[in-house]
Image (tube, grey):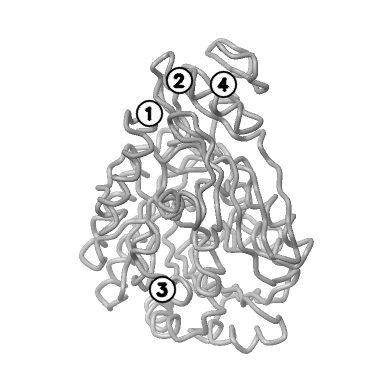
Amino acid sequence: MATTTFKGELIAPGDPAYDAARAIWNGAIDRRPALIARCRDAHDVVDALKLARERELEVSVRGGGHGVGGHAIREDGLVIDLSPMRGITVDADQRVAHAQGGVLWGEFDQATQAHGLATTGGIVTHTGIAGLTLGGGMGILQRAYGLSCDNLRSIEIVTADGSVRTASRDEHPDLLWAARGGGRGLGVVTSFEFDLHPLGPRVTTAQVLYPYEQAPQVLSRWHELAPRLPDTVSPELALWSIPVDPEIPEDMHGLKVVIVLGVYAGDPAEGQDALAPLSELGVPLMDASATVHYADVQSSVDAAFPAGGRYFMKSHFMNQLSDQAVQAMLDCDATRPTPQSLIVIRTLGGAVARIGEDESAFAHRTAQYNLSIDAGWSDPALDATAIEWARSSWDTMRPFATGGVYVNFAGLNNETRHEAVFGSNTERLERIRRTYDPHRLFT
């Protein structure tokens, strides 16, 4: 590197650490970058971008390395790896947290829960805060507190020209607007400032497993109930197979079920009554609802989504779950290729909908649900089968959807049109990208 100020680590093909450094959470992604720059601070990022320009290398950015589409690793490009940047500070009095770009949600939750505070974050603790937030950031607190990006107060970002900028409502507000749901391509976000909310350390949860034969009834009743629940609950429903879990009888492992989930974002003493209707949608096979530590809720499905597994996800936003849509969903689930694969419905509304669609790059404020079709498998021989199931299921559900797609669950290789992801915000977002990256270094 031409500069002597770089304090991080440069890893190239042939180096002993290369294969481990290029591996990300999704084991289905196998790309070989020309160079990986592990950065320790924003100044290292500036130097790495200078090197990319000198060598005419396209750039990708790795935060937590959890993005399903594998955009953290660019073939023959330069990877700016923020994984060493894991600093977190919490101002409990102001209810604000600062976190560097390599922080994972489990680390963030641990730091904030020490003060009885939280913000909307991923439900797998090894997800990075960066990718989730920049794409919007759905989570189990979203109806109460908004998306992750809605809680974003400011960012530190290194843009393509090597400038270190602060983007807030007062400085470069266009960059902050774009960072709130605009996904990749703006620059390298080296730190995030979040609003926090009083929650925890214990919360009341609903976790109800219904027999699969009750799926039509449970789905129909859930659809009627979910939007009417208070904003302190963000109901979810999944068609899945019970994963291996020491707290679940072994003879139930692998059994297809309907799982209904919810967390009460408030006083645990009030949560049981608010969540009780989720246990009354049918005759439960198992009801594991309880008052537990919020951090345990956040990590409860970690083991079901291990690093190195193979994943492919696509999504739709929806406003209704008609009888025809429910049946189509069940038809898709009938051909689910592996027990690890699942179909998930998440409820929006509440705080998500109280922000205007033009107030951030996230363009799906009025949608009632997000439907995520998640293929998971371990055998490379199943790659084509698993991906085709997700894509064909997405096609099947398209007639029941709004036409919008969540950028974090958008398939591979830009297979989704920008207009489907960013809606009416597409042109404004592209204009901001061209302003700060006119030569498309981050394309």
Q: Which mark's residue is nearer the viewer, 3 or 4?
A: 3
Q: Secondary structure at mark 2?
A: helix
Q: Amino acid at mark 4?
A: Asp
Above or below, 266 relative to 89: below
Front residue of 187/309: it is 187
Is residue 120 at least partly visible in the picture?
yes
Q: Nearer the viewer, mark 1 or mark 4?
A: 1
Quadrant in which the N terminus is drawn: top right
Residue type (three-letter) at the residue carrying disc 3: Ala
Residue type indicated by callout 2: Ala
**Residue 19 — which label?**
4
Residue 322 falls in which quadrant of the image? bottom left
* Residue 417 coordinates in the image, percent (x, y): 25, 47
The reply to whether dot 2 and dot 3 touch (C-beta < 8 Å) is no
Residue in the foreground of this view, choosing between 198 and 205? 198
Q: Earlier in the sequence, mark 1 or mark 2?
A: 2
Residue receiving disc 3: 353
The residue labelled by disc 2 is 52
Residue bearing the label numbered 1: 441
87 is higher (above) or lower (below) than 53:
below
Under circle 4, the secondary element is helix
Distance from label 1 to label 3 (Cα)? 34 Å
Location of the C terminus by quadrant is: top left
Q: CA distance from mark 2 to mark 3?
A: 40 Å
